[in-house]
Image (spheres, rainbow, N blue to C red):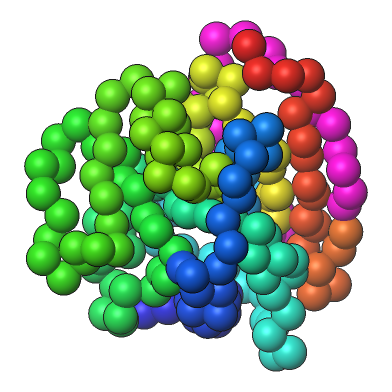
Amino acid sequence: MFTPVLSLLLMLYRKFPAGAPLSTDLMQANNRVYIATSLDGFISDRNGGLAWLDSVENPEGDDMGYGNFMANTDALLMGRTTFETVCGFDVEWPYTKPVYVLSNSLTKVPAEYEGKVWLVKGKLPEVLQYIHERGHLSLYIDGGQTITNFLAQGLIDEMILTVFPVLLGGGHPLFGDLPVAQDFELVNSKVCLGKLVQSHYRRKTGRP
């Protein structure tokens, strides 16, 4: 069952169709994160649940900047677990923009997602080159492990993190161990719905 927050996100996905203009300059290529997290840094509870996203009411349907974020996104890149989670929701496929699924185990896209989802595998720079060659330069990186893998190779350029005022006490963490420290600068921070803190960070130095 979807929470009001997830329902809002599904509405916004449909608002920005795949036919929107794509980035064409490789200098514009960037990998961005937009994700919610608990106070203690988890993106789902111990059972993979997201009910905590329903802890803050959003009666006016405030998109908290998500619409602008998606309007400037060419495609999504997510891991297998995130893909399978979305497939398990009892709704229509929520994305109108191309979705790339990073997986070394999946060999075929289910028939109902053909033309909407593409499987990719290999080293991340090679995966990005393949996606860029298809004209998709501004990417929404989704899924905890995928985000960690990108960070580990210094491949995340921006992060928009929305912190919910709840301590889950355990679950799937947003960040895993990284080989080296990385510096990000705060672009802006704001309070959403009177209870959430959303912070926009940008990589302080260029990619390695």
For the point 73% across and 89% down, the residue is 60
Magenta span covers which residues?
Answer: 163-189
Decide which of 66, 96 is in the foreground and name it.
96
Q: Is residue 135 visible?
A: yes
**Res 38 seen here:** no
Residue in the foreground of this view, choosing between 8 and 77: 77
| Residue 202 position in % (x across, y down) | 77, 35
Image quarter hosting the N terminus = bottom left
Location of residue 47 in the rendering, given as x and y in whole percent from the top left corner: 34, 54
Q: Residue furthest front?
A: 24
Report whether 63 appears left or right of 177: right
Can you name the residue that lies furthest to the bottom here?
A: 59
Residue 123 x %, y %: 34, 20
Q: Across the whole image, how many numbered discs are drawn on residues?
A: 0
Left or right? Give the position of 51 relative to 195.
left
In the image, is 78 to the left or to the right of 108?
right
Q: Position of residue 98 (x, y in %)?
A: 39, 59
Residue 64, picture quadrant: bottom right
* Camera-nearest residue between 131 and 87: 131
Reply above or below: 113 against 17.
above
Give the vertical position of 193 relative to 39 (above or below).
below
Asked if residue 176 lies in the magenta stretch, the reply is yes
Identify the residue shown where x is 81% and y is 24%: 204
The residue positioned 37% from the left and 23% from the top of the image is 126
Could you tell me what secondary structure mostly forms the magenta stretch? Answer: loop
Q: Residue at x 63, y 11 (%)?
A: 208
